[in-house]
Amino acid sequence: MINMPPPPEPPLSLVGAVDAAGQLVDVECADGIIVAVHRGGGKTTPLTGEIDLSGMVLLPALVEPHTHVDKAYTADLYPNPATDFDGAIVASARSFTEATTEEIAARARRALLAFVAKGCLSVRTHVVVGTFFGMKAVEAVTGVVAELTGLVDVQVVAHITPPVHGPAGRENRALLRDAIAMGVTHVGGNPYWSDDPVHETHACLEEAAIAGIGVDLHTDETLDPRCLTVMVLADAVKRTGFPHSVVASHCVSLGVQPPDTQRRAAEALAEAGVSVISLPQTNLYLQGRAAEEAKPRGLTALAALHRAGVKVAAGGDNIQDPFNPMGRADPLEAASLFVSAGQLDPTTAFDAVATSARSVCGWPRVALEVGCPADLVALPGSGLREAMAEACTSRVVVRRGKVISDKFARGAAVAGGGL
Ligand SMILES: [Zn+2]
């Protein structure tokens, strides 16, 4: 039997949109990449496959660098009445004990399709694995990822429960290796939960080095300034010369350190080549609940990290689960919070769910430039800031030069971009 190659996608012209700066731009796509960009709306000859994007902003496809699709949409099924972190752990553990593989897969599929409809075509999700959780979530999510491979690129991080190090971690290490054999792409974990964060961090790096894959750890989710496991990770990467990508996720305690400690930690991360993913939604929801006044925001030290040259991305973390009853599978939500809670300018905030997030996760660069992958999203607005503020869900999504979702009601756009 001869396997015929799939027929090439017909060329696609996207006309009438503006770019992030509000300048008219027409983009032509062929063979999955951008083949021409006309600034100022210079193209005059209508092509077959032309799509009118008047009233919309055309942007690189969005990126979700940190989510948990295995927990998505469980907020009502497994409520967290305490509304705090410990309550979320209990409710979430129950969800994995009681749910079937098929139920977890159905919710993961719903989450990934929700990302696609928002124009997010690259997703990194953490998935629980370990002696308590078993392999159920890994089976469910890797199955859905294979099913949706034509729609969305997904990296799966094995979110292994401590311990991984020492004799007590033997069983978890075996399960971690099983998960890697099943196709997970990164080693995750929570070293700060361990009784020995230093050895736990080294064990995660060792397992990843054996498999030849990267690491993405929940470095800490606490406002306790004594928990500086982010420095442990930077030091371990530097000492071992770990050769693959390393991400420190959350890094909440870094945000409550004195400026000099923030600077030293940020410089150590930069020197070790460790990137940071901040998760504003869940941190704002869970952190600082006991404070009656001057509540801390729970975000990491964004300014110090940027000054040191650390690559920073923003993730949505939890989607309507016991850790966060909100969450709408839209990276523009995290970007908006980087503006309002992180006090960054809109361009830097958008970069955290686009170019910087791609770089942190190792996906190819996407921009409105010839030769880049034609992975794009258009949504109503007169420029980037307005598009982010409105975050309209009526979007046109282009993957590899083909429209895969078009929820924009043409003719409904009004001046200023609102619907
Ligand atoms: Zn997380």
Image (spheres, rainbow, N blue to C red):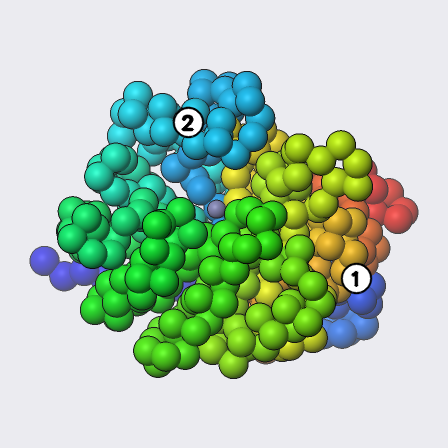
Which residue is at 32% across, 45% downward? Answer: 161
Q: Does 395 sit left or right of 195 as displayed?
A: right
First reached walking from the N terminus: tag 1 or tag 2: 2
Q: Against 219, is 95 above or below?
A: above
Circles 1 and 2, Cβ within 8 Å, touching? The answer is no
Q: Against 222, is 16 above or below?
A: below
Q: Does 118 sit left or right of 100 as displayed?
A: right
Looking at the rendered structure, the kind of residue marked 2 is Val
Task: Indicate the quadrant containing the N terminus: top left, top right, bottom left or bottom right.
Answer: bottom left
Q: Against 271, is 216 above or below?
A: above
Q: Residues within 10 Å of mark 1 (few under 14, many from 20)?
A: some
Of circles 1 and 2, which is in front? Answer: 2
* Residue 224 place in picture, x, y as percent: 58, 49
Mark 1 — residue?
345
Local SS, label 1: loop
Which residue is at 60% across, 37% downward? Answer: 286
Q: In the displayed image of the protein, which residue is found farthest to the right?
A: 415
* Residue 132 place in picture, x, y as percent: 25, 35
Q: Does 227 sit left or right of 154 as displayed?
A: right
Q: Residues within 10 Å of mark 2 (few under 14, many from 20)?
A: some
Looking at the rendered structure, the kind of residue marked 1 is Asp
* Residue 152 place in picture, x, y as percent: 44, 52
Which residue is at 61% across, 74% downward? Answer: 264
Q: Choose between 250 and 365: the one closer to the eye.
A: 250
Task: Indicate the quadrant containing the C terminus: top left, top right, bottom left or bottom right.
Answer: top right
Mark number displayed over residue 90: 2
Local SS, label 2: helix
Could you say which quadrant of the image residue 208 lies in? Answer: bottom left
